[in-house]
Image: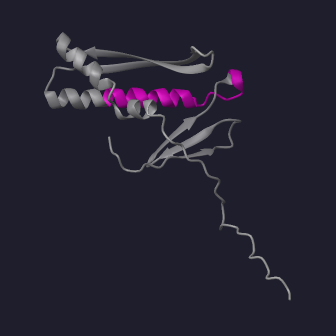
Amino acid sequence: MSSDKRTVTVSETGKGTFTQEVTAGKHTITTDEPEDIGGDDDGPNPYDMLLGALGSCTSMTLRMYANQKQWPLEKVSVTLTHHKEAGADNKKVDVITRDIKLEGPLDETQRARLLEIANKCPVHRTLESKPTIISALVNDGPAKTAPAPKPPTP
């Protein structure tokens, strides 16, 4: 995983109420909401994308590690679910379940180590770190500034 600054642009398509175009480098993905909440279901919803990011990162991290160790990992599959449940203080908390299937003649020590490595994938670490999110409004055209105040008249 690269630690370089990444930019992703998300724009409404105008096709449906919630349909979005996500552009990351040369890749474009459509996201949407399901029909039962007013979307057209033209793509995964934002939580599906979040789960996909975590699952992809997990699988890639495990593949890199197993290849480095030359372990007989034949295939990785990750199934994720997300829901909210009441926490101890009765506030809703997000719960993500990640089921990892490792195929190949791995021994129990290798399997256990791969589970440890899964918990170190960069997206997992980001989600656990409570990242700072900085939001700002930007203008389409040149920045508009207020005119300088006039000096008082004598």
Q: Main secondary structure of the magenta part?
A: helix
Tell me, yes or no, whether the highlighted magenta stretch contains residue 19.
Answer: no
Residue occupying image coordinates x 69% and y 43%: 14
Is any part of residue 105 visible from this angle? no
Q: Is residue 30 left or right of residue 65?
A: right
Residue 15, position in %: x, y?
Answer: 68, 40
**Quadrant in which the C terminus is drawn:** bottom right
Could you say which is closer to the camera, residue 87 or residue 114?
A: 87
Could you say which is closer to the camera, residue 34 or residue 15?
A: 34
Residue 30, position in %: x, y?
Answer: 56, 37
Residue extending furthest toward the right: 154
Residue extending furthest toward the left: 70
Residue occupying image coordinates x 13% and y 26%: 70
- Compared to residue 149, the image places residue 26 above or below, namely above
Q: Is residue 95 left or right of residue 66?
A: right
Tell me, yes or no, whether the highlighted magenta stretch contains residue 39.
Answer: yes
Q: Quadrant of residue 91?
A: top right
**Quadrant in which the N terminus is drawn:** top left
Residue occupying image coordinates x 67% and y 35%: 18
Residue occupying image coordinates x 15% and y 22%: 71
Residue extending furthest toward the top: 108
Q: Is residue 63 left or right of residue 78?
A: left
Q: Which residues are magenta?
A: 36-60
Residue 8, position in %: x, y?
Answer: 50, 46
Residue 129, position in %: x, y?
Answer: 44, 34
Residue extending furthest toward the front: 154
